[in-house]
Amino acid sequence: MSDQVNHFIGGVPVAEGATFATYDPVTGLVVREVREADRAVVDRAVAAARSALPAWAALPVAERAAWMRRLADAIEERFEDLVAAEIADTGKSVTQTRTLDIPRGAANFRSFAEIAAQHPENAFHLTDVLSYTVRKPLGVVAVIVPWNLPFLLATWKLGPALVAGNTVVVKPSEHTPGSVAVLAEIAASIGLPPGVLNVVHGFGGGSTGQFLVEHPGVDAVTFTGESRTGSTIMKAVADRVKPVSFELGGKNAGLVFADADLDAAVEGSVRSVFTNGGQVCLCTERLYVERPVFEEFTARLAKRAGELRFGRPADQDTTMMPMISAEHRDKVLSYYELARGEGAEIRAGGGVPRFGDDRDGGYYVEPTVLTGLPHDSRVNREEIFGPVCHVAPFDTETEAVELANDSEYGLAATVWTTNLSRAHRVARSLEAGLVWVNTWYLRDLRTPFGGVKLSGIGREGGTRSLDFYSEPTTITIKLEPGND
């Protein structure tokens, strides 16, 4: 793709609006210029989606599913272009991008194609009454995508929205427009009907995002991002009572029991705390460890944190990435300072790495392990969204569950134990939408995904996604008795 990112409306690029710069998180240097959509551009995108809606919605599900498979095939043909765009925007490693982000994008389209093809409609037969349901698309859906997993999460929403018969207007994060811009090119290259998939770029409040969610031609909004932004979107759509699906923030807990396989618990926690620089809503920021193994676990976790490698994205052995922006780096560092002020013991990290090269202009922070803070400290209550966790001891199973549940958030949790009864008992007791036992981020795309409390509204994944992106209509027919 070029150094300038344009909107994509009605099947063609649109080079309108002022431009803004995006920056390479590795060096802090400008990557590209991006067009910002004003109200007029958003109007055009929504109009294109509305114009394409009747014909797209009228296609049989099997034909829309076939389009999803073509998109998946074309993603694999443009695989390296997508990898390059994702790395340029996020600074993540080529290993993660090639094994997770881009392959999952293709898998999302294929998975929802299969799920839609097998999604049954219900029928209920009484003596002289037949009732059955048919599903219809919501209409034009605004898809607002975050910066941490931009391609993966865009396709996670686009797959079910499109296969259900909706047309979409996508707004990627202002930090990460690249891979979705390539996806728009891919859609045009395979002949996806113009207006089915539209992309507009820009910021949130007072800009493109606000213009999109408030637009009267938008029928529903799906959003992944901060809880505060989700609340703002809810208020914006309240008057029109638009359907919303939100996957929001997390302050996720991990419980490590004394009977756990400690090797697995340490390595699993390294992944759950530090993957993607801790910039995943599912990452663990609070760890509670049974007292007999607390010191050993904490020491081993801190040692492993210090061994994570700040290589360049192209290096195969790079295991740490920068923060997405200077602003976010400063936010994470402010929590490191807050932890010191609240009396934390810093077992690992706590600062900024220095390289002696152009990476010193990037947005790096050290992976950090904290102990010694009270449960009600701000560091233990507020989402940081960086490579940091606080580790605290517990003495009983009941205490562990209470500590984990004492949070405004409820997205994900991990449980490390070899006791099968405890695994089932504790997992059911946790106030979280997802609970992993002796693993983390192991996903079956057919299962529900979402959180409770401030972590979101609704569930996506499998048939739950199709249920959100379509409305059921119940048809009831009074049957006349037969005349034999």
Image: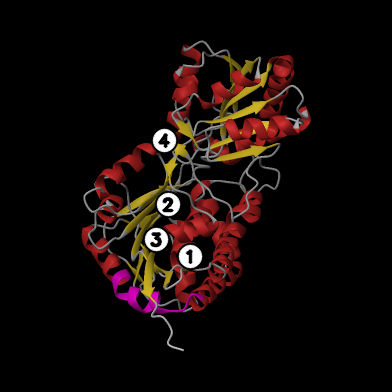
Which residue is found at the position 53% from the left and 34% from the top? Answer: 364
Query: Alpha carbon of mark 3 to alpha carbon of mark 1: how far?
Result: 15 Å
Mark 4 or mark 3, earlier in chain: 3
Name the residue type under label 3: Gln
- Whole-Å distance between the Cαs marked 1 and 2? 13 Å
Foreground of the two, 355 or 73: 73
Q: Nearer the viewer, residue 134 or 405?
A: 134
Within 10 Å of the Cα at label 2, are there few (<14), some (14-19), or many (20+) other Cα atoms?
many
* Circle 3 or circle 1, nearest the eye: 1
Marker disc for residue 183: 1
On the image, the x and y values in percent for residue 355 come to 60, 33
Where disc 3 sits, the SS reads strand
Give residue 408's quadrant in the image.
top left
Q: Residue furthest bottom?
A: 484
Per the image, the residue denoted by label 4 is 454
Q: Is residue 175 magenta?
A: no
Tell whether label 1 touches label 3 (CB within 8 Å).
no
Q: Residue at x 64, y 39 (%)?
A: 436
Q: Which residue is mark 2?
A: 145
Element carrying mark 1: helix
Residue 56 in percent (x, y) is at 39, 76
Is residue 284 toward the left or the right of residue 471 in the image? right
The residue wearing badge 3 is 4
Q: Which sits earlier in the primary sequence, circle 1 or circle 2?
A: 2
Please tell me whether residue 51 belongs to the stretch shown in magenta.
yes
